[in-house]
Image (spheres, rainbow, N blue to C red):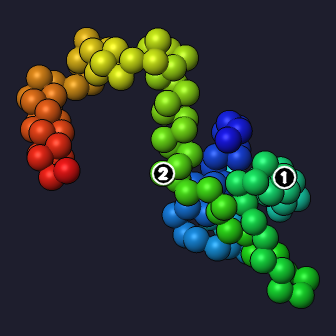
Amino acid sequence: MKQLTKSEEQLMQILWAYGAQFLREIVERMPEPKPHQNTVATILKILVEKDFVTVNVFGRQHQYVAAVTKEAYSKKTFKQMVKGYFEGSFSNVVSFMVQEKNLSVEELEALLEQVKKQQHKK
């Protein structure tokens, strides 16, 4: 799976949040200042070429649908980040989060309890 640019990811966020959309609907959902419709159409064309989006054709109208789920993309992107920045170690990620005070000891203990419950269900 290829990496998305910021503008490509912005369009994917819209498709993930709202489902199948026509070009004008996507443009309407874009934040201000809204890009030109041709710019959005070009980015959608690239997303189709990258196999992130499929197109349903209704006469002259094209409806765009996410072909990759947000969960699948998030999982792949997170794994690449862990591999690239934390030597592939999820323990290093957690340690970093605690050191940076993004994760408290209480939150870490709560996560550990969740993991233990998940393990017991299997």
Q: Which residue is mark 2?
A: 71
Q: Position of residue 9 (x, y in %)?
A: 64, 46
The single residue placed furthest to the bottom in the displayed view is: 59
Residue 38: mark in rendering: none
Q: Amino acid at mark 1?
A: Glu
Residue at 55%, 57% in the rendered image: 69
Compare marks 2 and 1 and give the one earlier in the sequence: 1
Amino acid type at circle 2 is Glu
Depth check: 98 or 25 in front?
A: 98
Q: Position of residue 88 (x, y in %)?
A: 46, 18
Report how far apart the C-alphas of labels 2 and 1 lie in the structure.
20 Å
Instruction: Let me know if residue 52 appears in the view.
Output: yes
Residue at position x 55%, y 17% in the image: 84
Q: Quadrant of residue 14?
A: bottom right
Residue 47 x/y as whole percent: 77, 52
- Closer to the camera in the image, 75 or 24: 75
Residue at 89 percent across and 87 percent down: it is 59
User: Which class describes the residues within 10 Å of circle 2: few (<14), some (14-19), or many (20+)?
Assistant: few
Image label count: 2
Considering the numbered disc 1 on the image, is that residue within a helix, a strand or a loop? helix
In percent of the image, x 54 and y 38: which residue is there? Answer: 76
Classify mark 2: helix, strand or loop: helix
Q: Is residue 77 left or right of residue 86?
A: right
Residue 39 place in picture, x, y as percent: 84, 53
Q: Which residue is mark 1?
A: 49
